[in-house]
Image (cartoon, rainbow, N blue to C red):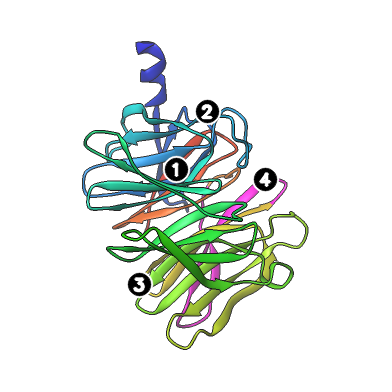
Amino acid sequence: MKKYILSLALLATCALAGELKYQEIEGFLSPESVFVDKNAVYVSNVGKKLEPLAKDNDGFISKLDKNGKVLEYKFLSGLNAPKGMKEIDNILYVVDIDTLKGFDLSTKKEVFTLPIKGAIFLNDIEKLNDTTLLISDTGTGIVHKIDLKTKKYDELLKLDLKEFGGPNGLFLHQNLLYIAGYDPSGVSGGMVLSYDLKNKKIQVIKSEKEPYDGIVLKNNILYVSSWGKDLKGVIYALNLKNKSVKKLDLPLIKGPADIFLDKNNLWIPKMAEGKILKVELE
């Protein structure tokens, strides 16, 4: 067991000519999402098989330090296919197919459970405030608004799956909710959008349809992950000011899922490879 755990912390740091400096962390099982708080890094693992909707009880959350060292491989276990995460008041909230769960980070006990009626593919979480979460359901096209105190929820918006794809990744900045679209049927792809919480208007940022997944914002640049074609994933940098689009110069990424930006470090789950990339942005 000790040898196995050590292998999980195998790190490779590379900086080839023209490429960003990155670190690769191996040993995960279909890692879907990364969340970083002030103390640690959390990685949601869907399980041995890349089956994001399978209720097979083999999903778990890994805990790492910020250097990428695995502190506890199965920090939280007994989940099905955990995906997006968010921490509020020392409780780590995680979506698990059709249920929102919360775990006390000190005791690891499950302290919150809320099944979402009609949910198909709960995917990402964003925080509106300390008592309200926004949760995407890629399967129905709905972004749910969850009141953590009352355990009541309603529909913030519903995307047309054929036109935009279902909401996958979410990122909230001021009054704009940025959305990475993903077609759950795998046919037409999705778009990159913004939704104004005040006037309730949708704006298309990237209309080229692809299987987009994660989305973050830094200095007016949206970083968006796409699974691409034939598992040749990319990370786009979309400049919101000059409307330019470029791909980050990174090695092949098979299944870049729900990315996270911690200061200048972009954490990228390579879901189909069982690895995490930690990329130092310029």
Q: Nearer the viewer, residue 282 or 199?
A: 199
Find out whether residue 240 is within the magenta segment.
yes
Horizontally, is 132 left or right of 268 in the view? Answer: left
Percent coordinates x, y for residue 265 in the rendering: 34, 52
Secondary-structure class at tag 4: loop
- Real-space Cα distance between discs 1 and 4? 16 Å
> Is 5 situated above or below 94?
above
Q: Quadrant of the N terminus?
A: top left
Secondary-structure class at tag 3: loop
Q: Quadrant of the C terminus?
A: bottom left
Give me the residue at 74% from left, 69% from top: 162
Place residue 174 in its image quadrant: bottom left
Secondary-structure class at tag 1: strand
Q: Could you tell me if the residues under marks 4 and 3 are in contact, i.e. CB atoms within 8 Å? A: no
Q: How many marks?
A: 4
Give me the residue at 22% from left, 52% from top: 89
Tell me the mark number nearer the camera, choosing from 2 and 1: 2
- Real-space Cα distance between discs 2 and 1? 23 Å
- In primary-sequence order, the first of circles 4 and 3 is 3
Identify the residue position indicated by label 1 in the image. 277
Identify the residue position indicated by label 2 in the image. 58
Identify the residue position indicated by label 4 in the image. 231
- In primary-sequence order, the first of circles 2 and 3 is 2
Secondary-structure class at tag 2: loop
> Is 253 situated above or below 197?
above
Would you say residue 268 is visible in this rendering? Answer: no
Amino acid type of the residue tagged 2 in the rendering: Asp
- In primary-sequence order, the first of circles 3 and 1 is 3
Identify the residue position indicated by label 3 in the image. 219
Q: Could you tell me if the residues under marks 3 and 1 are in contact, i.e. CB atoms within 8 Å? A: no
Amino acid type of the residue tagged 1 in the rendering: Leu
Percent coordinates x, y for residue 277 in the rendering: 44, 43
